[in-house]
Amino acid sequence: MTRLIKYEFYKLFCRRSILVVLILFTVMNLFKINSEFHSYSYLADGNDSRSWNSVYWQLYEDYRGEITAEKINRLLSLYQPLADATADMTASTATDNPDMMTGNIYSDQNILEKYYVQPMEYFYHYRTYARNVAERAKENAAVYKERGQTYELRKNSVIYNLYSGRNIGDFAYEEMYNYYLNYDFSGILVLFLCLYGIVGTFVCEKETQMDMLLLTNPGGGKKTTFAKITAATLFAISVSIWFSVIDYMGFTCSFGSAEGGSLPLYAVSNFSTAAINCDLWQYSILSAAVRAVGVWTMGMVFLVISMFWRSALIPFVADFGAALCLIITGASQSHFSNIWLKVINPYSLLANRILFSKTEFVGFAGYPIQSFLAAIVFAMILGAASISAMMLLSRRNSYIFCWTVKSRRRTRGTFMSALSNESFSH
C-alpha cells in the first residue's frame, strides 16, 4: 500500500505544471508580503540616519524589555514636550531641524506616539482590562449559579479562567506580527493550488477509461481510491505547510525582524480578546496546523465533487464555484453575529484569525464550546465523512471478486468430485 500511495502521489502531483504553479504562487506571495511592508509600515522609509526606521531601532534599545515606571517616565519626558508644541499645529514644518531625531518636530511626535506611546500604554493597561473582564465573569458566574443557568455558569467560568492572570509585562517590537496575523492572501493561493492539483485525481483516469481497466488489477478498486485520497491529503497538507513557512519567513525578511515573538498573543491589539493564551511564535505554529486542517477538509470536499465526472471541466468549475463561495462568505465572517456560520465554513480555518481573535462560544449538549474548537472538530468530521463517502461509492475490484468466485466454484467442484469418488469406492 505504501508503494501504491507513493506512486499515486508522484503521478498526480509531481508534474511540471503543478511545480510551475507552486513556484509562481510562491513568488506572488513573496511580492505581496513585501508590498504589505512598503505600503503600510512607516518604517519602510529607508536606512537614512533620520529615517523612521533608523530612529525607531536607535530608541528601541532604551525601551525594550520589562515595562518599568522609569522607562515610562523617560518616554513621556521625551514625548510630552513634542505633543504640547504641536498641539495647536503652529510649530515649524522644517525638515532639517538639527534638534529633532527625524529632522521634523511633527515627525518626531508621530513616531513616538505610534510606535512607543500607544503600544506601551496598551501593554501597561491591558492587565487592568483583563482583570476587569475576569472579575465580571466571576460575578456573572455567581449570579447564574443562583439562577440554575448551567450553560451560562460554565461559559463565564471559562472566560474567568482564560482572562485571569493575563498581563503584558514586556515591551517589544510587534508590528511584523500585527501584519502577519492579519494576512490572508496566501490562504487563497493555497486553496486554488490544491483545487488545481486535486481536481484531476479521479478524472484523469476516467477520461481515458483507465478506471475500468484498473478494476481488473489486484491493486485497483478501493485500494486505488484509498491511495489517491492519501496522496491528495499529503499534497494538501504539504502545500499548506509550505505557504505557512513562506509567510513567516517572508514577513521576517521584509520587516527585517522577528522581535516580539515571546509576547503573548493578546499583545497585538486586534487580538485583545483572544480565545487562547499563548505566545506569538506559538500561535504561528498553531495557526499553520489549523490552516492545514482547513485545507485538507476543503480538499476532500473537492475530491468528492470531482469523483462523479468523466470530464475535468465540469468538476473544476463546480469546485471553483464552491471555493469562491466559501472565500466570499469567509471574508465577511468577522461581521456575522451568528457564530455557527463561522464554525461550519472550513475557510475560517484558513483565515483563522476570525476564530482566534475573539472569545466566542457555541452551545452543544448544554456545554459552551469555543468557536475555534467547534470549527476544527466540524472540519475533521466533514473531511472524514467525505473520505467515507468516496470509499463507499468507489467500485469494488472486479479482478478480486471474479477470482474469489472462481476459487469458490473450483473448491466446491473438487469437494463434490472427492465426495463422489468416496461414495463410489464404498
Image (cartoon, rainbow, N blue to C red):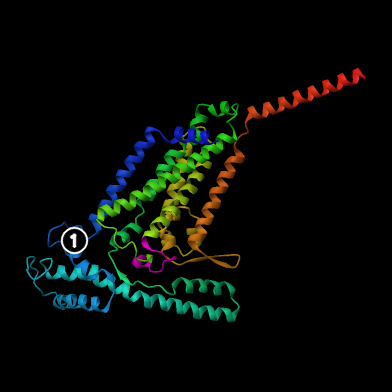
User: What residue would you read off at disc 1?
Assistant: 53
Horizontal and vertical percent position of residue 414: 79, 22
Residue occupying image coordinates x 33% and y 61%: 261
Instruction: Tell me, yes or no, whether the highlighted magenta stretch contains residue 267.
Output: yes
The three-letter code of the residue at mark 1 reads Asn
**Residue 174 coordinates in the image, percent (x, y):** 30, 63
State which region is magenta.
Answer: 266-280
On the image, the x and y values in percent for residue 357 come to 41, 64
State the quadrant of the C terminus. Answer: top right
| Percent position of residue 408, x then y | 74, 27
Q: Is residue 408 above or below residue 288?
A: above
State left or right for residue 374 relative to residue 398: left
Q: Main secondary structure of the magenta part?
A: loop
Could you say which is closer to the camera, residue 137 or residue 253?
253
**Label 1: element kind:** helix
| Occupied quadrant, residue 392 | top right
Q: Is residue 81 left or right of residue 416?
A: left
Residue at left 51%, top 53%?
A: 379
Q: Is residue 269 visible?
A: yes
**In percent of the image, x 32 and y 75: which residue is there?**
124
